[in-house]
Image (tube, helix red, strand yellow):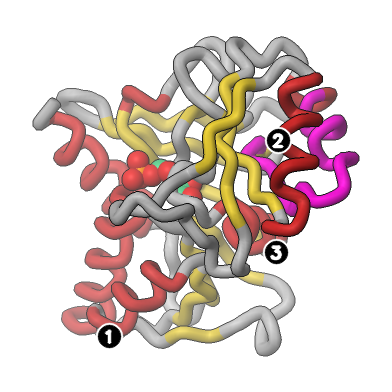
Amino acid sequence: MAWRESAKERAAVEAVKLVKDGFVLGIGAGSTVAYALREIGRKIKEEYFHVSVVSASSQTSKLAREYGIPLTSLDEHLQLDLDIDGADQIDEKLNLIKGMGGALTREKIVASASKTFVVIGDESKLTDALGKNQPLPVEVLPFALPFVTSKIRKIGGQPVLKKSSLGSPFITDNGNYVLNVDFGVIKNPLRLDRKLKSLPGVVETGLFLGMADVAIVGTKTGIKVIRKKQ
Ligand code: 5RP
């Protein structure tokens, strides 16, 4: 699906148009966000644009440094002007599944700290039902892994431990594991999120509910902008 790369790039470049000089940004993780970082880096270099970024992942921080983007932290800025992040699924109410890159917890913190949250992706991320052909990432404390795994099975999920490219368990920037859980179609995302968050040892879920303000989605030929209904 070669069109997806140009669609992701189009969405990312469009999202960066919302960034104003002087903004403190939140930036998530993933391949779509990488295009946004490249565009921000270009604007800093060519347009003498001043922004700083609170990064939600070590990979994003590395890329930001490569593009000459100044990094800052939540210690310096409790509130961010705008967050740009990708997603694994986006439903029509702009509820999301995120975290297939394993950065869900920091991504949720950064999105929550931002005045506006813009989600970007290609059209394949749009869905009529969260969880359809898409597992839900759940970050888990290593100590609690057997306990949480068995509890998730009891509530109807099929958890698979996320692995790194070397085949060992993937470790998040917070030192935790990620379970990618198949729940099938998630009929009541809020209820599932509450159930999962009530399990001791669950650090965070990849359900981002009611958080995104706007989705900028690259299609095969253009861009679709979907705003949150008030
Ligand atoms: C990482 C994420 C990513 O935003 C999500 O996985 C989408 O990634 P990509 O833009 O590569 O499709 O949530 O934790």
Element on which disc 1 rests: loop
Q: Amino acid at mark 3?
A: Ala
Q: Is mark 2 within 8 Å of ligand 1?
A: no
The span picked out in magenta is 192-207
Q: Earlier in the sequence, mark 3 or mark 1?
A: 1
The residue at which mark 3 appears reads as: 113
Residue 74: image x %, image y %? 67, 79
Question: How many C-alpha atoms fall within 10 Å of the one at disc 1: few (<14), some, or many (≥20)?
Answer: some
Q: Earlier in the sequence, mark 3 or mark 2?
A: 3
Q: Amino acid at mark 1?
A: Gly
Verify whether residue 212 appears in magenta: no
Q: Does residue 39 appear to the left or right of 230 in the view shown?
A: left
Image disc number at residue 149: 2
| Residue pictured at 87% horizontal, 48% vertical | 200
Q: Amino acid at mark 2?
A: Thr
| Residue pictured at 66% horizontal, 88% vertical | 76
Residue 73: image x %, image y %? 60, 83
Element on which disc 2 rests: helix
How far apart, in angstroms, are the residues tagged by discs 3 and 1?
A: 23 Å
Q: Which of the image's four quarters has the C terminus? A: top right
Mark yes or no: residue 111 visible: no
| Residue pictured at 27% horizontal, 53% vertical | 13
How far apart, in angstroms, are the residues tagged by discs 2 and 1?
A: 41 Å
Give the residue furthest to the left.
2
**On the rendering, which quadrant does ligand 1 occupy?**
top left
Check the image and report above or below for 213 versus 191: below
Which callout, 3 or 2, points to the residue nearer the camera? 2
Q: Give whichever of 161, 75 is nearer the camera.
A: 161
Element on which disc 3 rests: loop
Image disc number at residue 127: none
The residue at which mark 1 appears reads as: 68
